[in-house]
Image (tube, helix red, strand yellow):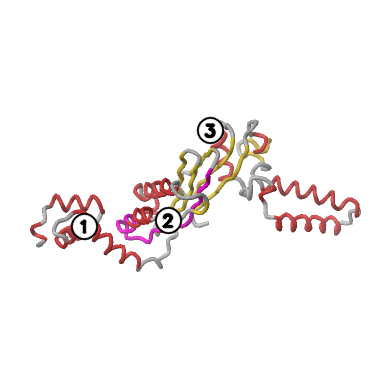
Amino acid sequence: MSTANIDAKLVMALRNRTGLGFGDCRSALAETGADLEKAEALLREKLKGKMDTRTDRTAGEGCIAMAIKGHGGVIIEVRAETDFTAKNEEFRAMATELAGMALAGTAGEVAMSAPMTTLLDGVRIKTGENISFAKGTHLSGGNFAKYLHHDGKLGVLLQYEGAMPEELAVGICQHVAAAVPAPMAVDEHGLAADLVAAKREEAKKEAADSGKAANLIDKIAEGKLRKFFEETTLLGQKYVRDDKVAVGKLLPQGVKILAFVRMRVGA
């Protein structure tokens, strides 16, 4: 079919679906006999192939997106080449939709499904950038709270059991985002055993080297470990909104923090 015979309204409909140029849309419609669905599929296939040749380009920007539904929560990172695209409303809406779609998957590391890949490819085609899914975590069970920094590049997903006021739950998310150092685990039981063992031996050596009596070395080392736990675990750290109280002391009776995920673009 000649491009001259393609209805301009049909071309505009295809443009609205794909975000591509008038000429590309008109040519695709001509090639598919003015079949809108086939023309859209043709464009996506052609341009996806073109985009796949650009995946070696650095995608140094992006955003964090989260979704919570029922007893499930997802946090993901989606990457783009430019800050302009990373701040684009359509890009961020796509990332949020991906997070929601990931809730249908199994708990653990998020894997891209075919529908999720199709959604992402559509934005890759429109922007002409190397847009990609970087990573994601799906937590299941209990209740959830989230916090997304205003720039969209830092997010925290909190998983907990029990009834906690929303303001406190979000506040704890903000603590995880802002605390220096960032918490490494919920409590000392979540820290790597080899890290704790190394810190204990380091503390013992420091005590011995300073000339402390042998019968005091273990006690001194345990004191140093408690300080380390206070500095590096969520429940042990002083709350960023009130440095006179540890986060663990803020939890209402019956509330238990199960996990948290802190995610920053590029980290």
Residue pointed to by mark 3: 166
Q: Can the viewer see residue 84? A: no
Front in this rendered view, residue 29 or 111: 111
Residue 225 x %, y %: 76, 50
Mark 3 residue crowding within 10 angstroms, few (<14) / some (14–19) / many (20+): few
Q: In this view, does 141 lie to the left or right of 248?
A: left
Name the quarter where the N terminus is drawn: bottom left
Residue pointed to by mark 1: 38
Q: Nearer the viewer, mark 2 or mark 3?
A: 2
Q: Residue at the left extreme?
A: 5
Q: Please identify the quarter of the rendering in which residue 256 is found.
A: top right
Residue 240 x %, y %: 61, 40
Q: Is residue 49 left or right of residue 198?
A: left
Q: What residue type is labelled 1?
A: Lys
Q: Which amino acid does label 2 sit on?
A: Met
Q: What residue type is labelled 3?
A: Glu
Residue pointed to by mark 2: 112
Residue at image location 28% in from the left, 62% down from the top? 45
Q: Was residue 127 drawn as part of the magenta stretch in this picture? A: yes
